[in-house]
Amino acid sequence: MPISPTYRPDPRFPDLGPEFADAVRAEAFPQTTLRFRNDRAAATVGLDTLTDAEWIAHFGRFEPLPGNIDPPLAQRYHGHQFRSYNPDLGDGRGFTFAQMRDAPIEQGGTGRLLDLGTKGSGRTPWSRTADGRLTLKGGVREVLATAMLEALGVPTSRSFSLIETGEDLVRGDEPSPTRSAVLVRLSHGHIRFGSFQRHAYLEAPDRLTALTDHVIENYYPRLAGGTDRPVALFRAVIARSARLTARWMAAGFVHGVLNTDNMNLSGESFDYGPYRFLPHNDPNFTAAYFDSSGLYSFGRQPEAVFWNLQQLAGALSLIAETDALVDALNGFGGAYRDELTAAMLDRLGMRPAGAEADAGLVQAAFRAISEGGPRLRWEPFFFDWFCGDQARALGSLRGDLYAEAGFSEFRQLMARFEPDRPERLADPYFTRPEPEELLVDQIEALWTPIAATDDWSAFHAKLAGIETARRAWRLPAQGT
């Protein structure tokens, strides 16, 4: 098998031992039809040279990669689901399949440890009454979500592979029977807040210490030589969680299910179910039809992340001083505000001008978006005003709206800032009347021809359009 010499296997998770995961095998699927392979992501870990047949063998039949995890491992964890504690969780339809290193820094990479994890690979000891499968539509939605979030500068897992598996699934929230698939994602770690909660619940401080040491060694190596390691790790996770939350908010993204088992220690967004991108500004906008109380609505996401961090602190309190953990928690608000300011400036394409001025511009931007109400879609606002070209914004399809008095403060403040890399506006993408968006109606429109006639052209065209946007925005690199 011609795997690139840049493939650098480094399976670390098995070192934790049997209390942290269960050995499993993937299902033998009746069909393995390749629908999506992410060669750009594969190149970062030396797997882009695989033929399609080899790709299917590894990511459809899950033949082990050379020198890597064998057998795959379904992780054990607990978690709060809509703030109700559930001790019966774990990888119920997925497993950790491989770990390898990104390209070294001198070769343009990060050298980070990356995981390949699955979704829809079959039943595990943690499946409970579920079938361990993923609908093809769910896989399509996740591929689109990760592509769009990466383009918008959000730290996210990357959809690596999507293979249709030839089974008919019955689901209560979409027309059934529906087609099945297995997804592989590339992520900077799958260890969740709930991984720590499990060992706190089982009153196993030795395992909490082992897990803390594992996370520091593999994901926060700069902390390895320090003291009070649990608190140091917690502070680092708070910082990354603040950054992640701020980038969600600037992207107008609603995750939908911010349970503690859906947040990981590496600070990357992952596992996309009923997500939505905002059609227009609405703090009460929810993604999940079952979120009747709006617990995970757009405007409450910072609160949800903070609550989850409190639960992680509770787990770490078995091996760390409570006062130190509380002191770390108290830093989340300020860290989030700073990260939101930075994220919004990136989205507007403007250089920082000082803390007070930056905060004023960001507040004015949110007021302007609110002023637009349903007349102003979220993504076009940032597209029109990118790099502060007022003539371009006022000449856009929404120019009459921007000329109104409600936008005057924002216009005046933008004029005082310097654009960041204004040469980006020369990209043909910015001559378009509308930006790439990923609203729910657009996703449904992409799915219709797949379901009706197996026509994937609109799906691939959308991915190509999102990639065009990513290259045009050139936002700070995030995630894997």
Image: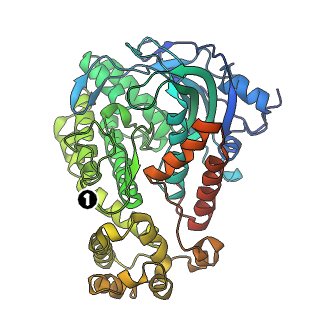
Q: Residue at x 60, y 77 (%)?
A: 431
Q: Where in the figure is residue 165, as x and y percent of width and height?
A: 62, 23
- Residue 216 in sight from this viewpoint: yes
Q: Residue at x 83, y 31 (%)?
A: 2
Q: Residue at x 24, y 35 (%)?
A: 313
- Residue 479 in sight from this viewpoint: no
Q: Where in the figure is residue 220, as x and y percent of width and height?
A: 46, 41
Q: How many marks?
A: 1
Compared with 294, 34 (above or below) is: above
Badge 1 local density, few (<14 within 10 Å), some, or many (20+)?
few
Q: Where in the figure is residue 84, as x and y percent of width and height?
A: 21, 28
Residue of label 1: 334
Compared with 448, 411 (above or below) is: below
Q: Residue at x 31, y 20 (%)?
A: 199
Depth check: give the residue in front, 449 or 409.
449
Query: Which residue extends farthest right?
Result: 2
* Quadrant position of the C terminus in the picture: top right
Compared with 52, 202 (above or below) is: above
* Quadrant position of the N terminus in the picture: top right
What amino acid type is highlighted by mark number 1? Gly
Depth check: give the residue in front, 254 or 340.
254
